[in-house]
Image: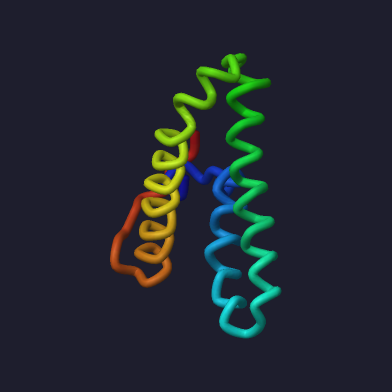
């Protein structure tokens, strides 16, 4: 993303917001609804993408959902660790125009 000057990954945003707002549970228990809403939005986006954009059946979506959930978390981990590395200057990438 950074190398080719692409925009940030919007499909990962609900997961990022869910994990960033998770510490609100320590402040007030009812504030735990906020990360739950973000996580539910992320799950709904995955299901919507499979059903309506990829044209999968409900059965196919149900069978592939656990793998997709793991896939999105692996992508999220990679995205966040690379973003931190770039911000801290630990990893340099030469930017290129497409």
Residue 19 coordinates in the image, percent (x, y): 53, 64
Viewer-side residue, 98 vs 59 = 59
Residue 10 coordinates in the image, percent (x, y): 61, 46
Which residue corresponds to the image point at 30% horizontal and 61% vertical from the top-left?
91
Residue 92 found in image quarter: bottom left
Q: How many marks?
A: 0
Above-or-below relation of 55 to 98: above
Residue 33 found in image quarter: bottom right
Which residue corresponds to the image point at 51% horizontal and 18% vertical from the top-left?
60
Direction from residue 93 to residue 18 in the image, left or right: right
Viewer-side residue, 78 vs 37 = 37
Residue 52 coordinates in the image, percent (x, y): 68, 21
Viewer-side residue, 26 vs 20 = 26
Which of the colour schemes (rainbow, by chain, secondary structure, one colour) is used? rainbow
Direction from residue 9 to residue 45 in the image, left or right: right
Which residue corresponds to the image point at 35% horizontal and 64% vertical from the top-left?
85
């Amino acid at each position: 993303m950074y190398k080719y000057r692409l925009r940030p990954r919007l499909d990962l945003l609900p997961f990022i917001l869910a994990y960033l707002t998770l510490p609100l549970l320590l402040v007030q228990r009812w504030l735990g609804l906020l990360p739950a809403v973000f996580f539910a939005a992320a799950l709904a986006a995955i299901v919507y993408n499979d059903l309506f954009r990829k044209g999968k059946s409900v059965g196919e979506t149900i069978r592939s959902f656990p793998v997709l959930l793991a896939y999105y978390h692996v992508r999220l981990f990679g995205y966040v660790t690379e973003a931190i590395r770039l911000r801290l200057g630990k990893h340099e990438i030469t930017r290129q125009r497409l």
